[in-house]
Image (cartoon, grey):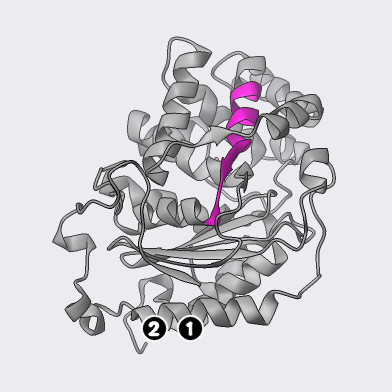
């Protein structure tokens, strides 16, 4: 177990974001922020309870993910104050995969506005798997929402830029700003996914035929594949989630990454579509905005307070980390996470 001030970019932690996003230690009881001891105990409890769980299986349709050690398990929490807590393999890098969709959505909504996302991509949940072609054909919005593969490719095609390199610079720059550190593409994962993404290529071409892809299909597919291949740790994800929890201000760098008015829209998408066709079940159990990825990561946000991230490669049938879900749910219940924005004691 490691705890203390989070660090990211050179220079370490920096204050920022205004008093509205922060709670001094003396005000923890008033604002409902758990104490350091409570955070430590919750992470330890979740880790010990689920470390030996063997349910689920790695994403074997991507060979580079199939070979990741299924025993890896790490959890991290970062608060809006920049305090960090972690246990297990919280510093082990893994492919961010679909969790990257949250931050590209932030990029698009910041650059083009919330209405553009609604009109050009869509915001409704599909109730179908994340890579469903049927969803594109059955639903009038076609790309449907930014958290399924179709909508995510539409999102990267909307990122402003004169070239693919310009768009990629904005995408990775946004990921870096949320993490408060420099992230990089796992080239092994990127090459592997590029060689096995024929299904997504078909979706991209289908979207283009419906006028719902806004750049060259091959370019959009490559940008999407590359963003999914970025390597992160559970610690990185917790900082990224804490930036959303703090209303768009990174608690480590003090830098505003996305306007506060856009954050509720992003959290709403996490609530309705963050865990694919199991999003309703997740919301019923936790009440928290969250996003998963087939690399084994999961990120949940407790608005105004903290974010929880977990990493464990074995997935359920919908593509969500089995241990990750259980660990985050355990921590939320143990800490009395303020579900759905309801007042304490509701």
Quadrant holding the C terminus: bottom left
For mark 1, does the 10 Å Cα neighbourhood hold few (<14), some (14 to 19), or many (20 or more) residues? Answer: some
Q: As rendered, which of 160 and 54 lies closer to the eye?
A: 54
Which residue is labeled 2 in the image? 37
Q: Is residue 316 above or below residue 151?
A: below
User: Residue 225's spot in the image, x, y percent?
Assistant: 65, 30
* Above or below for 257 versus 315: above
Which span of residues is magenta-colored?
221-234
User: Label 1 belongs to which residue?
Assistant: 41
As for residue 152 lying within the magenta part, the answer is no
Question: Residue drawn at (28%, 52%), measured in percent from left and top?
Answer: 13
Residue 344 in which image quadrant: bottom left
223 drawn magenta = yes
Whether residue 268 is visible, yes or no, is: yes
Question: Could you tell me if the residues under marks 2 and 1 are in contact, i.e. CB atoms within 8 Å?
Answer: yes
Residue at the far bottom: name it: 345
């Amino acid at each position: 177990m490691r705890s203390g001030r989070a660090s990211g970019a050179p220079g370490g932690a920096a204050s920022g974001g205004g008093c509205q996003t922060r709670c001094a230690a003396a005000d923890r009881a008033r604002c409902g922020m758990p104490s350091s001891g409570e955070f430590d105990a919750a992470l330890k409890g979740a880790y010990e309870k689920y470390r030996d769980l063997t349910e689920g299986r790695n994403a074997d349709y991507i060979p580079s993910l199939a070979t990741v050690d299924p025993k890896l398990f790490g959890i991290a929490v970062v608060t809006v104050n920049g305090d960090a807590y972690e246990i297990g393999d919280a510093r082990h890098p893994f492919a961010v995969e679909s969790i990257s969709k949250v931050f590209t959505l932030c990029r698009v909504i910041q650059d083009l506005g919330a209405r553009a996302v609604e009109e050009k991509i869509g915001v409704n949940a599909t109730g179908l798997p994340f890579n469903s072609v049927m969803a594109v054909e059955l639903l009038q919005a076609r790309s449907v929402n930014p958290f399924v593969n179709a909508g995510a490719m539409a999102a990267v095609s909307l990122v402003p830029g004169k070239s693919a390199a310009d768009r990629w610079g904005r995408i990775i720059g946004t990921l870096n700003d949320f993490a408060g550190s420099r992230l990089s593409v796992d080239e092994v994962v990127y090459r592997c996914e590029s060689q096995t993404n024929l299904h997504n290529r078909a979706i991209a071409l289908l979207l283009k035929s419906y006028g719902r892809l806004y750049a060259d299909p091959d370019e959009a597919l490559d940008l999407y594949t590359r963003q999914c291949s970025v390597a992160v740790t559970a610690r990185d994800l917790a900082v990224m989630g804490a930036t959303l929890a703090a209303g768009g201000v990174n608690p480590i760098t003090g830098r505003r990454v996305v306007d506060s008015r856009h954050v509720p829209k992003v959290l709403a998408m996490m609530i309705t579509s963050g865990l694919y066709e199991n999003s309703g079940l997740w919301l019923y159990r936790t009440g928290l905005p969250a996003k998963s990825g087939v690399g084994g990561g999961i990120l949940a946000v407790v608005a105004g307070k903290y974010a929880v991230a977990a990493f464990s490669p074995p997935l359920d049938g919908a593509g969500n980390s089995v241990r990750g879900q259980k660990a985050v749910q355990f921590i939320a219940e143990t800490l009395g996470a303020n579900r759905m924005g309801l007042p304490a004691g509701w």
